[in-house]
Amino acid sequence: SAVMIGICFLLAALEGYDIQAFGVAAPHMAPDLGLNSAQLGWAGSAAMVGLVIGAFTGGWAADRWGRKPVLIASVVTFGIFSLATAFASGLEPLLAARLATGLGFGGALPNLIAIAAEISKPQRRSFVTSAMMCGMPAGGVCVSLLARAAGEEIGWRALFLAGGALPLVVAPLIALWLPETRPTGSAKSEVRLAETLFAGGRAGPTLLLWAASLLTLVVMYLLLNWLPTLVVAKGYGPADGATASLAFNAVGIAGSLVLGLTADRAGVRLTMLGAYLALGAALWGLGAAAGLGGIVALSGTVGFLVMGTQYILYSLAPTLYPQAARAAGAGAVVGIGRFGAIIGPLLAGDLRQAGWSADQVLATLAPVALAAGAAIVTLTYLAKTREAESG
C-alpha cells in the first residue's frame, strides 16, 4: 500500500503543481496572449469549472466501471490538456485547454479519496488520506521554488510542458502497479446518486460536509490566488508576497500530516473544533499583522490549519456512504467544495475592486472559517448520535 500512497501522492502533487503554475504563469501569459484581467480570471476559473464537472462524473463512473480505468483516463486527459495549455495561442484555445485539464483533475480526485479509504485501516484513515492529499501543496511548493530558482529565464509555456509531460509518464505506472479497489459482485448494485447522498438519514451529514468543504475552500483558494497580491497591497515587494505564499504551501504540508495524525488519535471532533477556532484567530491576525516576519509566520499558520482541516474533510466523505457508492459520494464533496474554490478568488477581486483594504479582505475570512468549523462539529455530533441509536 506504500506504493499506492506514493502514486496517489504524485497525482495530487501534479494537480497542485498545475494550479500554482497558472498563478506563476499568469503575469507573463496575459501580455503574451493579449488578455485583460477579467479574461485572465476566467482562464483561472475554467480549470475549476472543469474540476466540478469531472468530480461528479468521475466519481460516478468509477463506482460503475472501476477506479483504475477512470483514474488512468483522467490522468491522461489532464496531461494532454496541460500540454495544450503550453501551446495555447489566444483566449479561446486557453479556456478550452484549462477546462479540459480541470475535467481530468476532477475525475482523478474522488478516486484518490476512495482508494485512501479502501486501503487504510479505519483508525488511520485521516492520516492516509492527508498523506496522499498533501501532494497538492507539495506540487505548489515545487512551482514556487522552480520559479524562484529559474527566475525570468523559464518561460510560462515551459511550466505547462513539464506539468503535462509528467502525468503521461505516471499513467503507465498506475496501469502497472495500482490494483483495483472497487468492490465487485453483490456490493456493485446500481446506486443512484441522489439516493446515495440523501437517503437513510444521510441528508443532514451530506449537507453539513458540503458546507464545511465549500467554506474551507473559499479561504484556501482565495489565499492560493491572492496572498502575494494582498501582501504587496500591505506595502511589501513581490518577493515578500512570494515568500508568504511559499510559507502557506510548505507549512500546509506539515499541517496535513500533523492534523491527520491528530484526528486519528484524538478524534475528528476535538481536532476540528480546535483547528477551526485557531484558523479564525490566525486569519484575523494575518489581516492585522504589519511586520513581514509576522505576515510570513501567520501565512504559514493559516496554511497549516486550512490544508489540514480540508484533507480531514476528504477523509470523512467515504465514511458517510455505502461502499458501492463511495467514489460518487466523495466526488460530490469534491465537486460542491470546488464552488468555494471558484467563489474565493472572485470574492477577493470584487472586494478589492470595491475599495476594501488587504487587511479587511483577510479579516473577512475569519467568520467564514468559523462557520465551516461549526458545520463540521455539528456533523460529528450527528454521527455520534446515529452510532448510539444504531449501536
Image (cartoon, rainbow, N blue to C red):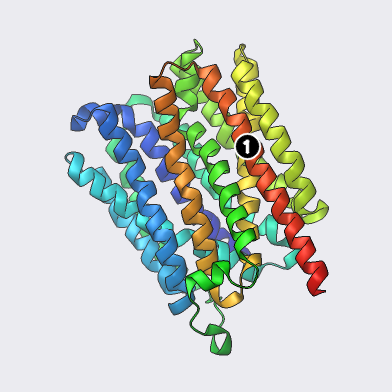
Residue 228 in view of the camera: yes
Q: Quadrant for residue 168, please give it.
A: bottom left
Q: Nearer the viewer, residue 28 or 122?
A: 122
In what quadrant of the picture does the N terminus appear? bottom right
Name the kind of residue labelled 1 in the image: Ala
What residue appears at the point 56 percent right and 24 percent down from the top-left corner?
362
Residue 7 in view of the camera: no
Question: Relative to residue 176, is residue 379 drawn left or right?
Answer: right
Question: Relative to residue 127, is residue 140 drawn left or right?
Answer: left
Vertical placement of residue 308 versus 287, above or below: below
What residue appears at the point 30 percent right and 47 percent down from the top-left corner?
98
Q: Give coordinates of residue 350: x percent, y percent.
A: 40, 26
Q: Give coordinates of residue 299: x percent, y percent.
A: 60, 27
In what quadrant of the picture does the C terminus appear? bottom right
The residue carrying mark 1 is: 369
Q: Give coordinates of residue 303: x percent, y percent.
A: 61, 35
Q: Give coordinates of residue 195: x percent, y percent.
A: 53, 73
Vertical placement of residue 171 versus 11, above or below: below
What residue appears at the point 53 percent right and 84 percent down from the top-left corner?
188
What residue appears at the point 24 percent right and 50 percent down from the top-left corner?
96
How many circles with numbers are drawn on the protein? 1
Q: Nearer the viewer, residue 24 or 169?
A: 24
Question: Relative to residue 83, is residue 212 drawn left or right?
Answer: right
Q: Considering the numbered disc 1 on the image, is that residue within a helix, a strand or a loop? A: helix
Residue at the far bottom: name it: 186
Q: Nearer the viewer, residue 201 or 300?
A: 201
Question: Relative to residue 374, is residue 184 drawn left or right?
Answer: left
Mark 1 closeness class: few <14, some 14–19, many ≥20 residues within 10 Å: many
